[in-house]
Image (cartoon, coloured by chain):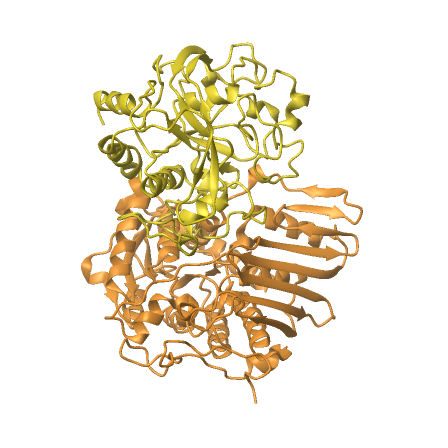
Amino acid sequence: MTRYYVTFLLGGLLGQVMTTQAQQTFTPYEQQLPGTTVSFKMVPIKGGTFTLGSPDNEKGRNKDEGPAKKVTVGDFWMGATEVTFDEYDVYADAEKDKTPTPDGMTRPSPPYIDLTLGMGKGGGYPANSMSQYGALMYCKWLYAKTGVFYRLPTAAEWEYACRAGSSTPYPYGADESQLKKYAWYQANSEDKYHKVGQLQPNAWGLYDMLGNVAEWTLDQYDENGVAAVAATDPWTAPTSKMPRVIKGGNYKDAAPALRSAARLKSDPIWNRRDPQIPKSSWWNADAPFIGFRIVRPAKQPTPEEAQKFFEEVVDKYKGAR
Amino acid sequence: MESEQQKFHDKGRRDFVKQTSMLAGGLLAMPILSKANYFSGSSDVIKVALIGCGGRGTGAATQALSTKENVQLVAMADAFPDRLKESYDNIKEALGDKASRVNVPEKNKFTGFDAYKQAIALADVVILTTPPGFRPIHFEEAIRQNKHVFMEKPVATDPAGIKRVLDAAALAKSKKLNVVVGLQRRYQNSYRELYKRAQDGMIGDILSMQVWWNQGALWVKPRKPEYTEMEYQMRNWYYFNWLCGDHIVEQHIHNIDVGNWFKNATPVTAGGMGGRAVRTGKEFGEIFDHHFVEYRYADGIVMNSQCRHWKDAPSKVDEEIVGTKGRIYCDKAQIVDHKGKVLYQFDKTKENNPYQTEHDELFAAIAKGQYKFADAQRGAEATLSAIIGRLATYSGQIINWDTALNSGLNLQPQRYAFDAPPPIVPDASGNYAYAKPGTTKYFS
């Protein structure tokens, strides 16, 4: 993909301007999965300008969080919680999907072992262990099912929504001891993820942004950090199947990994125990700590733009993890 | 056995020293010659044949070719040409810059039920990864042809197969052929460390063991009109006992083997219950979706074993060994005393990839001309442990180890061919008969 084309895609998919044509009013809403009783909540996130990354003196900071940079992101809705297995399984489990699969859509192959590892599945637990490809394919399926374009957040959108106006290490401030109110992590998780939405949300009504399962973003990981990103709607588009950027920390992590600016890079070791070749494109056999949440850009792409996105960003990198 | 191996090592070293000094007298020593005759080639290339080209076989071949030794894949065999081709392409892709190690000309790709014989003939080491029902005949043939073996678990699906593997295992030992069985927990750092500490007495004497393989659903391949019944079953081998042995044998064997390992024994009886609670469709053949087995060892110690394929119930794959002084949580890689105080915690950053380690250690031994691995007997014992569990849950009876082993029970078809009838066939509506505890009989 050329630079030019990436820019073109960005223009279409990460748009800042609300259009009026058949768009939903920019308010919270609940999306039903057709043919089921399952639904999920979307929260409007008004775009704006913020400082991406962390200052040099932030405690626990890694080099790839800087140099911090002022960037602007457009309006989008974001899932109030991480995607749950109740939702994901309507895609992954044919028996739970009462409406036909859209043309040409494949469902995830069953994982080598049940990757919830006894931590819980139905009833509000976060979907976990999927590859980034598995997360994006869910978005593609969701688009085909609902007609609404959903995708993973860019790392910048994710961080903007997480910070909810803050510039402190955590959305509520700097005090690590307060983290237990907002996040499942090493200190309170008992080494497992928990049902979504049980702790306090951030100032913009988003639950479990920190801790619980870490969340896939749409970005290729760049070890030079955030220095090279664009000032408007920054996105490091994919150039290879890995590594990709994960945000938010997880239930096994200590506090510093949960900071808003912290970035994690995906690692092949997360699928080491898959003993088959080809390795599953859909699952990471050793990463029960990864999940995702989705966004809906306020300016929806045209069907052609959406199709290009799925071809160039998803299908081209089948098995991205 | 320890001392026998030691003698062999000493002999190996003596030969090495003798040969090297002999060579040094003439040319500069070429260390590769020290292992001449241990594998067939005149160079240092170790030739591998893959028998069974599914996902796991492809993985195992890739691991064999990823070792430090000069390993080449020279032959492949599978019942199905499409599986073989996919596997060949996937191995090359997975190997990346080592793809030149795949050296399988078209004439060395063999398909059909008898393909294994020709492929085995071309290799020094054979990888046996077909559905387990074929393992006994393949293992027998590999040992008959003097080959080292990596074979996946389980090693059979019925007691008659176990007998054949045990006989071939004894022959392998007498021929000093290395055999590794893919019970990979035996090659995993955390388990090895836990076992060492259990042997050193950290948990005292074992009082009981609990082992689990509880997970969700597996794959099913849809029936196609052109399939014979034999082809359908071969492609859906997981759901037919002559091929798979049921999931207690095919998967749960790992955890049962850990119990046997830590106990340094095999069970004498099995009793239990099981059935088809949720997975009842005809596409699931004849196997159960859950088993709960009470294994009893000679000293009365019990191992409780549970396994299930229940889609939306919580999963658990683990082992817990309870002793007089403490207990081991295998998955956590932790030993605690009875008050919960942690006595030992394995540092999980030191964990290895045991699937790779199996091959690293096997090929290192072969390259050095060492005889180090004789896993076949314990592989057979672990498999039989799982089989008596299945016989117990199917029949509802207490199954005795010796009775089962000597029963001659044989699930295999009369003839292996795509037009041959498999040992179980569906009724008019496509359903397969399955065991009814209390009614199903195994031994008269």
Q: In this orientation, does residue B132 appear?
A: no
Please name the residue shown 57% across and 53% down the image: B314
- Residue B252, quarter of picture: bottom right
Whether residue B252 is situated above or below residue B66 in the rendered picture: below
Q: Colour of chain A?
A: yellow
What is the count of numbered marks? 0
- In the image, A220 versus B131, the foreground residue is A220
Whether residue A57 is situated above or below residue B387 in the rendered picture: above
- In the image, A9 versus B208, the foreground residue is A9
Left or right, B324 with respect to A276, comes to right
- Residue B294, quarter of picture: bottom right
Name the spot of residue A86 as percent of width and height, x first.
49, 46
Quadrant in which the C terminus of chain B is drawn? bottom right
Left or right, B390 with respect to B239, comes to right
Quadrant in which the N terminus of chain B is drawn? bottom right
Which one of the lettered chains is coloured orange? B
Name the spot of residue B62 as percent of width and height, x first.
36, 50
Whether residue A304 is situated above or below residue A157 in the rendered picture: below
Name the spot of residue A264 as percent of width and height, x first.
47, 27
In the rendered image, the residue lying farthest to the bottom is B444
Q: In this orientation, does residue A215 appear?
A: yes
- In the image, B35 versus A234, the foreground residue is A234
Name the spot of residue A103 as percent of width and height, x first.
26, 48
Please name the residue shown 70% across and 67% down the image: B302
Whether residue A184 is situated above or below residue B424 in the rendered picture: above
